[in-house]
Amino acid sequence: MPSTRDIRRRIKSVKNTRQITKAMELVASSKMKKAQQAALAGRPYAVLLASMLASLASRLDETGGTHPFLVRREIKTRGILLLTTDKGLCGPLNANLFKLVADIKTPAKFVAVGRKGAQYLARTGRDLLADFPISDRVTFAEVRTVIEFLVRQYLDGVIDTLEVLYPRFKNTLVQEPALTPVLPLDNLAAMVERLKKQAGVESTPDTRDMTFEPGPAEVLGALLPFYVNRAIHQLALAAKASEHSARMVAMKTAKDNATSLLDDLTLKYNKARQAAITNEILEIAAASFAQQT
């Protein structure tokens, strides 16, 4: 059995660990709430954008489908934006994303957001075009730099699709890895339905007679880049909310495990101390008995 000194040393170490994990849990909880609020704040814009695109979807034939975002071409190289974290201590969040990356067998080029994703892609020898840092605030100015790079690669023909691999936020306890296609938008009507569903808006057809100036093609051409920007920015906000949620859960689990281990060590320490006291009493009693005899 370990000595009482060793057990006291372990108890002190576990208490320090519990204190650190509790502080990290509180910090992650605060950041998670802010990230959720930021993601929800973009919903009114999403609803308005969905309504405008729905009005144009029925007039898609008038545009001739000439916008490069709408034209489907032969997929030779996929373009995938991988959204991961800069730090660890967030449970299996990144590992689940890396499993999906490992399942991609077709030619693909990657753009990474987050140090963990960039390190994984470099370590596995995958084609990494660039990596970008994004702060916890996930401002649009930061994400726009990533979007502009991806769109430029798409328009130049370096990649033939634009997909986002990120941890989808379902609730505080569940974050699922998801691969969401963004470009090309060859099925605009389906995209509008998916956008409205994500925003929690009922899909009702717009039967109003509208006149678009200078024309549907020009309005759609100006509107589609806004959609791409909003879609990727919203996914980045969801990924950040997932990161803080996963970290909060991981730190809570670590804190609970430290508390349980502390209880076990305290019990072991009391047993060791009781055994030491008992041995001392037996030694004193044996010495007293030996003197009497």
Image: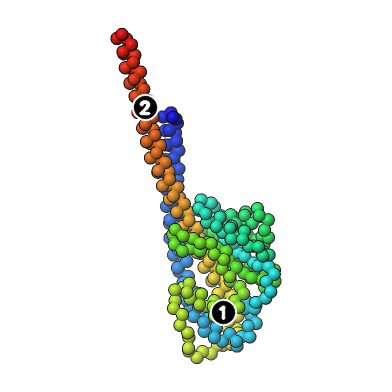
- Which label was assigned to residue 216? none
Looking at the rendered structure, the kind of residue marked 2 is: Ala
Residue 83 showing in the rendered view: yes
- Residue hosting label 2: 275
- Residue 132: image quadrant is bottom right
Task: Label 1: state its secondary structure.
Answer: helix
Give the camera-side residue of 211 and 66: 66
Image spot of residue 219 (x, y percent)? 57, 83
Q: Nearer the viewer, residue 60 or 32?
A: 60
**Residue 28: % across, % down:** 45, 54
Colour theme: rainbow
- Residue 225: image x %, image y %? 59, 75
Residue 259 picture location, percent across and down:
40, 43
How many angstroms separate mark 1 from mark 2 (CA)?
76 Å
Image vertical order of residue 67 relative to residue 13, above or below: below
Q: Who's the residue at 64% across and 56% down the image?
A: 121
Q: Nearer the viewer, residue 282 or 220?
A: 282
| Quarter of the image where one finds residue 278 | top left
Tell me the residue that label 1 is attached to. 188
254 versus 13 height, above or below: below
Camera-side residue: 275 or 233?
Answer: 275
Mark positioned earlier in the residue sequence (1 or 2): 1
